[in-house]
Amino acid sequence: MADVISAKSEPYWVATAPSSSFQPLKEELSVDVAVIGGGIVGISAAALVKRTGRTVAVLEAQRVGTQVTGGSTAKITSQHRLIYTNLIKNFGKENARIYAQSNQEAIEKIAQFIAEYQIECDFERQAAYTYTQSRDKVAAIEKEVEVAAELGLPASLVRETSLPFPIEGAICFDHQAQFNPCKYLKSIAQAIADESCYVFEETRVLDVKEGTPCEIITASGKVKAKEVIVATHMPILDRGGFFSKVYPQAHLALAARLENDRVLEGMFISTDEPTHSIRTANDEQGTILIVVGPSFRPGHETDTAQGYKNLEAFVRSHFTIRSVEYRWMNMDYHSMDGVPYIGKLLPTTKHIYVATGFNAWGITNGTVAALILSDAVLGKSNLWAEFYDATRLKLAVSAKNFIEQNIHTAKDFIQDRLTSYPDKSPSDLAPGEGSLMKVQGEKIAAYKDPQGKLHLLSPVCTHMGCHVAWNNMEKSWDCSCHGSRFRYDGTVLHGPAVRALEPKSISLPEKE
């Protein structure tokens, strides 16, 4: 019986989707709109722009749909735990209604894309539930049902679900949906690419210079565009200051083969701690259970092996499974006031737009972002844009969280400089082991691969100088300050960093 440690290290959605083969950018190019990032925001926005007859180019650093979107739970829902009570408290009922309506419209926009492009992506309508096993939290759920219904959402209170354990209560949204997001995005990307519109993979953008036109600088060429959408999860352009307005959270996920036929109807997330998000998917061999565990700050929880074991223990305590087939780690960015930032990079910016801070609900919020930003680059007004404005400053709502999170980041930065790394030799590492150490007076991030080859790197994150930490299951170097992640060899896995960790060359004494 395969366990989580021996499972394939890849998101289930990516593993079960066809591979894409778009070429990297190799020469200079001019288009009306350049989109940086091939996830839910970028691909959706590019498709909407192309429909108007404009030329568009998507620039993806890795492969379309395989990063954050491909690692999500892939729930298509406007139910984002118990958010609407807080939205009314912090932003008022009309703004809460905008959030509700825009996310509901995002669900239908995804369904529309699937129908129009005839996409086979395992789309199916499901109810979405936020549940509690604690009597103390039932009142909060009852309040959320009342509030959500007033906003026009399909909300109801239930006391029982198809979960294999009892609950005290849950809020249910009917007629939500789920799908394979990787299949979805790859299909739309294929429809975008033609003789006048482009999708480039393995094309990492390093910078954007605003002008008439804007200039997008990549590792392999330049693109000129009248308008630019930066859809890189966290903007790679630091001048927007979003590194201080959002904070990173990571999750571990697994896909397990159920022993019996489908036992769940619906998609689920708990209000209790530790939080678990649960859904199923079907394939030729039966039913797959997808479970995501509690969030944690990347670069802090480095023993992800134990985290996976804890998640597997939760699954086995409630479900009968044959094996754990896939495991993966995903990233989210949370905004300081609980609402995504969508709009101009800066108040003075005329042609560069961004979207970030989806608070772990990127499928619908990302589609909302695509709808707003496609309107923006086309010069069209959008009724939701002011509420989501990326340059807003809601101090009354965000000040406490802003201070706490940025103090957290500052403490990490300072502690990195004060921490004494152990004096060790990289040669003493076991195959597959990585560690921070001091070698000949210099701080080193060292990894020994299964073949015994050493990879020696600077531990300084190339984004803003924090030190990375070794992730023992992902075989990655993770930065706790702003969420950048690097492969064991230093290449960028996840921004906002755009440059690899600096390699180090140290002469080591030969072992006798």
Image (cartoon, helix red, strand yellow):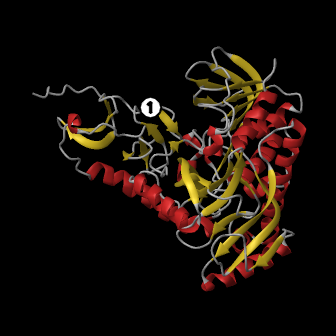
Residue 142: x and y in percent read 74, 81
Taking the view exactly as shown, the residue that stands out farthest to the top is 27
Seen in the image, is 390 located left or right of residue 127? Answer: left
Q: Residue at x 88, y 33 (%)?
A: 51
Taking the view exactly as shown, the residue that stands out farthest to the left is 512
Asked whether residue 389 appears in the rendered view, the answer is no
Which residue is under mark 1? Answer: 500
Q: Quadrant of the C terminus?
A: top left
Q: Secondary structure at mark 1?
A: loop
Of residues 348 and 404, the one drawn nearer to the viewer in this rendering: 404
- Alpha-carbon neighbours of circle 1 within 10 Å: few (<14), some, or many (≥20)? some
Q: Residue at x 32, y 54 (%)?
A: 415
Q: Amino acid at mark 1?
A: Ala
Q: Residue at x 58, y 28 (%)?
A: 204
Name which quarter of the figure residue 359 lies in: bottom right
Q: Residue at x 33, y 53 (%)?
A: 414
Seen in the image, is 62 located left or right of residue 176? Answer: left
Residue 175: x and y in percent read 84, 61
Seen in the image, is 349 located left or right of residue 322? Answer: right
Residue 167: x and y in percent read 65, 78
Asked whether residue 363 appears in the rendered view, the answer is yes
